[in-house]
Image (spheres, coloured by chain):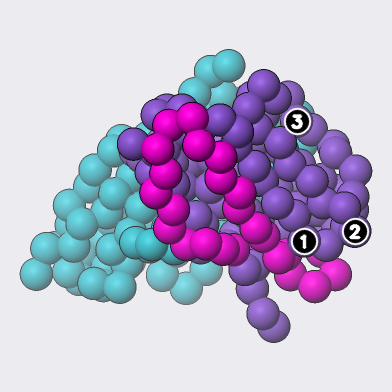
Amino acid sequence: GEDVEQSLFLSVREGDSSVINCTYTDSSSTYLYWYKQEPGAGLQLLTYIFSNMDMKQDQRLTVLLNKKDKHLSLRIADTQTGDSAIYFCAETRDDKIIFGKGTRLHILP
Amino acid sequence: EAGVAQSPRYKIIEKRQSVAFWCNPISGHATLYWYQQILGQGPKLLIQFQNNGVVDDSQLPKDRFSAERLKGVDSTLKIQPAKLEDSAVYLCASSLEDHAGYEQFFGPGTRLTVL
């Protein structure tokens, strides 16, 4: 099937905002997710958004959803060294979760 | 609350050998998933159990991979015989129910290297 697309790398200075972008494939996806994976660990659900929403904010995290373009973004405000990880965008397809390849976020001092 | 447990954390084998991975999901979680995560890629679902029944194994290479969840709790995933391309991290996840709206909780994974 088609792939969930996201850029592979992002470098951001500590204290700046990080924006990770994703293009998904299934316009009927009910939920769209952002997962975080730290080195040597499994995935952790960071946040999700229902398909009937345009935006969701949770502390330093802001998710924007553009259903027309099937575009999802994750903004991390005031990026910290602890945010260094791989971030996976995921969509629901046939009640299964389909992951992108992940964006590695690197924090510059 | 204890998370999803997996063992071993690392395994190195030679091609054509057999290997087995074990997963203990979060207590009370009816749904258990095995994912394969190849380096540089996102997790790919191999098999999904609801209690001790298989819901979806469409992406499981059944000529060499098998999985079971006999009592609806723990699960094992076996590869026999292993190929070089099986080198990956094998992630186990569990959720309360079989629906994408329920959060999946992931274990730390087993990193398999096939030489």
Q: Residues within 10 Å of mark 2 (few under 14, many from 20)?
A: few
> Picture coordinates of residue A56 (x, y %)?
56, 57
**Residue placed farthest to the top in the image?**
A1
Q: Residues within 10 Å of mark 3 (few under 14, many from 20)?
A: some
> Picture coordinates of residue B99 (x, y %)?
81, 47
- Provide the chain ID for the residue under circle 2: B
Q: Which residues are magenta?
A: B6-29
Q: Is the C terminus of chain A in the top left, top right, bottom left or bottom right quadrant?
A: bottom left
Q: Which mark is residue B71?
A: 2
Report the front residue among B91 and A75.
Answer: B91
**Of circles 3 and 1, which is in front?**
1
Q: SS at mark 3?
A: loop
Q: What residue sits right under mark 3 in the picture?
A: B57
- Provide the chain ID for the residue under circle 1: B
Can you see residue A37?
A: yes
Quarter holding residue A18: bottom left
The earlier-in-sequence mark between 3 and 2 is 3
Chain letter of the cyan region: A
For badge 3, the amino acid type reads Asp
Chain letter of the purple region: B
Q: Which mark is residue B74?
A: 1
> Dots 2 and 1: beta carbons under 8 Å?
yes
Q: Is residue B22 above or below residue A2?
A: below
**Of circles 3 and 2, which is in front?**
2
